[in-house]
Amino acid sequence: MHFTLDKNEKYVVVKLHEQKLNTLLAAELKSEFLLLNSQGFNNMILDLSESMYCDSSGLSAILVGNRLCKNSNGSFVISGLSATVFKLIQISQLDKVLNITPSVNEAVDYVLMDDMERNVKND
């Protein structure tokens, strides 16, 4: 699986450099989410701007990332969805569960705002 990580103080951006998020890649992506979460990253952004296809295994990997972040009081955001991938997410009714933004910059803004709101609530 080809991907890059952009680790920041409050979040990590996982940019997938693959045309397809399918069974062949899903297990490795889940493992990467687990590893990042164990390293203390509870805010993750998954950039799928280069992915034009996703199957049910890919959706499962996305849901694992979402669950890990939620369980560690963080945010999981996916960005850069192609029309095909977005349609699959809508058909699966996961657009009601997942945080989706058009761009990574908007995802970063979402994560930082969400983090700030959590900190205010905890004070």
Image: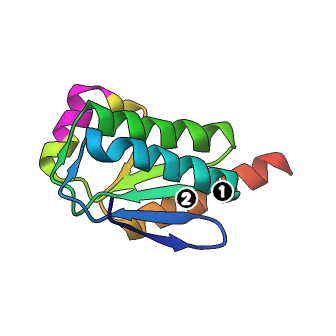
Q: Is residue 42 magenta?
A: no
| Image spot of residue 38 (x, y percent) | 68, 51
- Residue 79 percent coordinates (x, y): 34, 57
Q: Is residue 91 magenta?
A: yes
Q: Residue 11 location in percent, x, y?
A: 59, 64
Q: Which residues are magenta?
A: 87-93
Residue 95: in sight, yes or no?
Answer: no
Crowd band around label 2 with a 10 angstrom C-alpha radius: few (<14), some (14–19), many (20+): many
Q: Which element carries disc 2, helix, strand or loop?
A: helix
Judge from the rendering whether residue 19 lies leftward or rightward of residue 38; answer left or right.
Answer: left
How far apart are labels 1 and 2 at the CA level? 6 Å
The residue indicated by pointer 2 is 111
- Quadrant of the snapshot with the N terminus: bottom left
Q: Which residue is disc 1 drawn over?
A: 115
Instruction: Residue 113 in the image: state x and y as whole percent.
Output: 59, 60
Rendered position, 106 above or below 25: below
The residue at the point 32 percent across, 47 percent down is 25
Q: Are marks 1 and 2 in contact (CB under 8 Å)?
A: yes
